[in-house]
Image: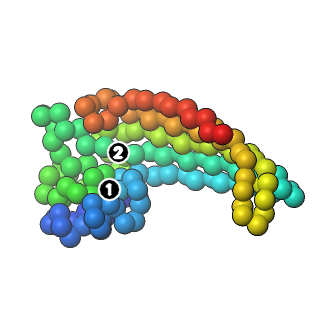
Amino acid sequence: MRPYTYSHNTVVLNYAHNNQPMAHLWGANFSELVLIGCYRKCRLFGEAKFIAGIRGFDVNNGIDNFNYGGNIYRDEVDRPFDSGVKIGQGIKTNTINASVQAGYLINPASNLKVFANISYRNFNPEAETTTVLNNSTVWFNF
């Protein structure tokens, strides 16, 4: 998704509703790859999801306060340049979300299931600011 895609020079006219982006959760200025696989045999089931993306965030450090196109709530007046705009400009960040789930369907009539899930999230920016931090998390669900 190209930078500035869903933003507008008047902030109230951007592509959002109730302070939520309507097109994509990441706003704009990103590229992503989504892979999903599902398996089902009798009452056993499994699912794997993998989402990898490159995102560009604003620096906002007091010196570089330009709008690099990822935040659809900023007006386009603060653009650093009008030509040579690239996906991932600003603070380039690699994001990975992955999860694997397996389970057993106990009661098909009520859809009662028992399952286990492991989820992994990695957020790795080129530079850290007060709003863009390097972190990695793992969740286990039963």
The answer to whether residue 84 shows anywhere in this view is: no
> Quadrant of the image for the C terminus?
top right
Q: Is 103 positioned to the left or the right of 52 in the image?
A: right
**What residue is at 14 percent from the left and 52 percent from the top?**
78
Callout 1–callout 2 Cβ contact below 8 Å: yes
| Amino acid type, callout 1 | Pro
| Amino acid type, callout 2 | Gly
Foreground: 10 or 16? 16
Q: Is 110 positioned to the left or the right of 83 in the image?
A: right
Which residue carries the number 2 mark? 56
Residue 67 percent coordinates (x, y): 21, 49
Q: Could you say whether the residue bearing mark 1 is in a helix, strand or loop?
A: loop
Q: Could you say whether the residue bearing mark 2 is in a helix, strand or loop?
A: strand
Label drawn at residue 3 = 1
Residue 7 percent coordinates (x, y): 25, 63
Q: Is residue 12 depicted above or below 40 in this figure? A: below
> Quadrant of the image for the N terminus?
bottom left
Foreground: 65 or 17? 17
**What residue is at 25 percent from the left and 49 percent from the top?**
68
Residue 29 percent coordinates (x, y): 36, 53
Q: Is residue 61 depicted above or below 67 in this figure? A: above
**What residue is at 72 percent from the left and 52 percent from the top?**
113
**What residue is at 32 percent from the left and 60 percent from the top?**
20
